[in-house]
Image (spheres, rainbow, N blue to C red):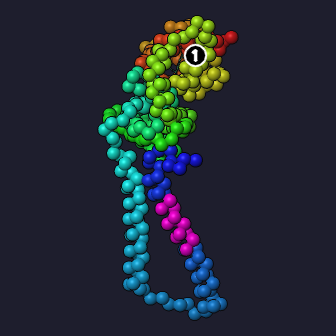
Amino acid sequence: MYPLGASTFVEGVNNAFVFILGIAFFFLISITAVIIYFLFRYNKKRNPKPTHIEGSNWLEFIWTAIPLILVLGMFYYGYVAWIPMKRIPDEGFHVTANARMWSFSFTYDNGRVTDKLYVPKDTAIILSLNARDVLHSLYIPAFRIKEDMVPGLTNNRMWFQANNTGTFTIFCAEYCGLQHALMYTDLVVMEPDEFWEWYADTTAVAPVIPEDANLALLGRQVVESKGCIACHSLDGTVVIGPSFLGKFGDPVRVITDGVEREIIYDEEYVRRSIYDPDYDITVGFRRGQMLSYEGEVTEDEVMLIIEFLRSLNE
Ligand SMILES: [Cu+2]
């Protein structure tokens, strides 16, 4: 599909892969052939008295030297493909990639935050990797790159350059708990002009909500894009946290400061649950599973989420 590969790293990794695969196939086929030949040549009928074979220094030398050369070849192809990944250029377009259980988000230097990674083509993209809770790993198979995201590790970076526009999948490649399999998103590579236009669109940083907008629908999009539904179902089933279905406006039993009490599942409760989830712990659930969304979910978005939760009751 892409003659050059989706990123500048593809060629090097493919070369190493094809080289190793070629050697593996060569030996698979030739060893199998020799086994079959020996089976006939040295069977009991043709060779009634077992042949005694003495050692040979010459052969010993050959089967040490050839594998050594092959292994050094594998090292060479692997090394030349790996070095450019580790040489992060001084200049490039910078984005911070954030991972939490179980979603990615991307923060741009102009303040924009997205759930998909948008980048321009033919530009060095430098990602700072930041994990909120546990080990994650950012993996873009089409680009042949993967880097662990380690909580507390500062200045953990990776880079790439896209050769083509298109949409590619980003996976979390480090098992990070129950809903790990749902932790994936898209990488969208755009033409530079198109990208810079998108980037400069500051209305997207603080979206203006039109008066006739369907607030509940917008709220649903927030809940989906922020990854809340990895833990909160919309159909009543309990995943990691309580379901969102049919709760709004009803009483809910929570533990606050170790004391169980009953409060109303209202706007204030939802807002506090998002910004300070450990303040009230819903009875039957564990504390510390949900991390605060302070700085990640705006007040406007909280308002939309509330409208969405309210609409689930109708
Ligand atoms: Cu993960």
The single residue placed furthest to the right in the displayed view is: 314
**For the residue marked with disc 1, what is the amino acid?**
Gly
Viewer-side residue, 84 vs 102: 84
Residue closer to the observer: 235 or 36 = 36
Residue drawn where x is 33% and y is 45% of the image: 87
Which residue is depicted at the point 56% across and 28% down? Answer: 230
Residue shown at the point (42%, 67%) measured from the top left: 70
Residue occupying image coordinates x 57% and y 16%: 219
Comparing 282 with 218, the one in front is 218
User: Mark 1, residues whose alpha carbon is within 10 Å: few (<14), some, or many (≥20)?
Assistant: many
Residue 309 location in percent, x, y?
Answer: 60, 14
Residue 36 sits in quarter? bottom right
Q: Main secondary structure of the magenta part?
A: helix
Image position, residue 263 (x, y; %): 54, 8
Across and down, in percent, residue 101 comes to: 49, 30
Boundaries of the magenta span: 18-30
Residue 241 visible in the snapshot? no
Q: Is residue 182 above or below residue 289?
A: below
Quarter of the image with the C terminus is top right
Image side of residue 106 versus residue 314, left or right: left
Q: Horizontal and vertical percent for residue 149? A: 41, 37
Q: Which residue is denoted by mark 1 in the rendering?
A: 219
Q: Is residue 206 visible?
A: yes
Q: Secondary structure at mark 1?
A: helix
